[in-house]
């Protein structure tokens, strides 16, 4: 996604709204693939996969740092999203 200097608050807001739309589309796509993982996970431990969660968090923190974004912000966002998806998956595997 390109970055360009804005000449007005309206332009800034237009870009932010477009980014929000893309973020939501990407999160929906991520959810689609998380949902596809459920049949491969038969236990709560497999769903919670703490080692996988830590690996993902480490990776996104590194990517955030490389992009000049606060890694703590990205980690907090991902923790919230991952926690939500874990709860979603647990509902599917529990009787």
Image (cartoon, rainbow, N blue to C red):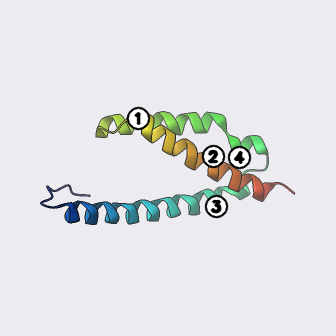
Q: Residues within 10 Å of mark 3 (few under 14, many from 20)?
A: few
Say which mark, if any, is on residue 83: 2
- Please state if 64 lies on the left or on the right of 83 as rendered: left
Callout 1 touching callout 3 (CB < 8 Å): no
Q: Which mark is residue 5?
A: none
Question: Decide: marks 2, 1 in contact (CB < 8 A)?
Answer: no
Badge 2 density bin: few <14, some 14–19, many ≥20, Cα 10 Å: some
Report x, y in % for residue 12.
23, 60
Q: What is the quadrant of the N terminus in the image? A: bottom left
| Residue at image coords 64%, 61% | 36
Find disc 3 in the rendering and name its residue.
36
Q: Residue at x 56, y 49 (%)?
A: 81
* Circle 1 residues within 10 Å: few <14, some 14–19, many ≥20: some
Question: What label does residue 71 carry, if any?
Answer: 1
Q: Nearer the viewer, residue 94 or 33?
A: 94
CA distance separating discs 3 and 2: 17 Å
């Amino acid at each position: 996604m390109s970055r360009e200097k804005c000449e007005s608050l309206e332009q800034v807001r237009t870009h932010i709204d477009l980014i929000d739309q893309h973020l939501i589309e990407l999160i929906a796509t991520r959810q689609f693939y998380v949902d596809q993982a459920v049949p491969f996970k038969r236990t709560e431990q497999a769903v919670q996969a703490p080692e996988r969660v830590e690996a993902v968090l480490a990776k996104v923190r590194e990517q955030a740092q490389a992009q000049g974004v606060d890694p703590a912000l990205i980690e907090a966002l991902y923790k919230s999203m991952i926690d939500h998806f874990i709860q979603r998956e647990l509902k599917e595997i529990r009787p």
